[in-house]
Amino acid sequence: MSNSLRPYGRQGVPLPEAQDTAEGVPTPRATQGRSPEGGQGAAEKPGKARDPFFDNAKYLAIVLVAMGHSWEPLRDGSRAATALYMVVYAFHMPAFIIISGYFSRSFDMRPDRLRRLVTGVGVPYVVFEVLYSLFNRWANDPSHEISLLDPWYLTWFLVALFIWRLTTPLWKVVRWPLPLALAIAALAAVSPDIGDDLDLQRVLQFLPFFVLGLCMKPEHFQLVRRRWVRIAAVPVFAFAGVFAYWAATRMNAGWFFHRDSAQELGAPWWAGIVMTFAMFGCSLVLTACFFAWVPGRDMWFTVLGAGTICGYLLHGFVVKAAEFYGWYDDYPWLHKPLGEIAVTVFAASLVTVLCTPPVRRFFRCVMEPDMKWAFRQDPAQGARERGRTPAA
């Protein structure tokens, strides 16, 4: 990587290469002298600088996810809320998935990485799928069945990430990975018989963004962080907002969820192919504009980027509680402009608190469990660790 390519901001080092972590959503390397929780960590190794850009991007993306979920009940009767909802849904998950793909580039079938995949993605999926199902049964639908094959609400992302990462070695050997992923997504969009098992529609339709992340290099992120891109992002987002306001009463928002085929959305089959490429292009442009606005230096929220999986999985209980208990109906003022702003601020504040280091430490037993008891000792890994241990 050329030393002349430097990220925007005050830092003077190139972006770090990808590194696996035990966390469900891959994170960049840890900053020298700073633990993922923001304190001083003696275990950090020199030369592994954690680029704040990616932590900032992850935090801001998860805030948009929470705000989008909080806007769902506000869409009825509010064209402006619907337009804003459509703009955010066009890029917030694609941005998150691209980053996940980028930091999955080093994944292979090495035993230690498979263990981290199981403990950092598989176990949280099982735990939270059961918890969300029990919560739904208790608060809303007593007949709701617990099924690990049918992800409910937020847990689909963990299933998708698990499958995507397992397929990473395949994408490394095919000649045209992104065109192939787009073809698979387009075929999924015209295949209503795929069904709901493992939420495969979303897994396949969001696949191109993960593969794109796998194909990206540090210089690609540096390109979108140039000054002219940040300036150009302003009219792009303005146009997107105007177009979304026009389309709010004309377009089915289900296209943004990528969970149904064209036929299930009441469109002809060929619309699935057209919309796959159109939505991918629009999402890619808006994601690039989003990345252009992400700060490249340490901010007050940078440390929260390491806890985004906590914010993602936990905020859904509050969102669903508001829906089940009719909080939006009990307080009509929430549907007014000031109420919508209050809901937005509350959602952003809630997910911010849920991403903090204390919350992450408290839930580490289910989101980042060690589980050494469940795996055989890998002799090669032991040798690597002994080789890294400094002599006494």
Image (cartoon, helix red, strand yellow):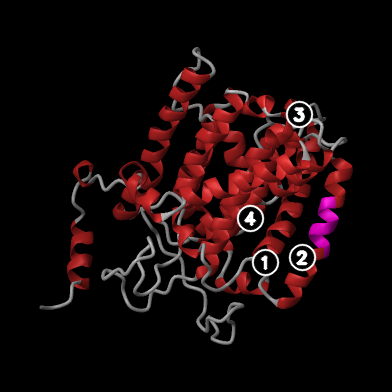
Magenta region, residue range: 235-241
Amino acid on which the number 3 mark rests in the picture: Leu
Q: Above or below — where is 86 with respect to 72? A: below
Give the residue displayed 60% in from the left and 41% down from the top. Answer: 204
Residue 293: assigned label:
1
Q: Nearer the viewer, residue 178 or 224?
A: 224
Which residue is tagged 3?
265
Question: Distance of mark 4 from mark 3, alpha carbons?
Answer: 25 Å
Q: What's the CA distance linking mark 1 and mark 4?
A: 25 Å
- Does the magenta stretch mainly form a helix, a strand or a loop? helix
Q: Nearer the viewer, residue 104 or 303?
A: 303
Which percent across, then down, holds residue 3? 54, 86
Q: CA distance from mark 4 to mark 2?
A: 24 Å
Q: Residue at x 56, y 72 (%)?
A: 218
| Residue 305 or residue 29, whichever sits in front | 305
Q: Secondary structure at mark 2?
A: helix
Q: Is residue 236 magenta?
A: yes
Residue 334 is left or right of residue 383, and the answer is: right
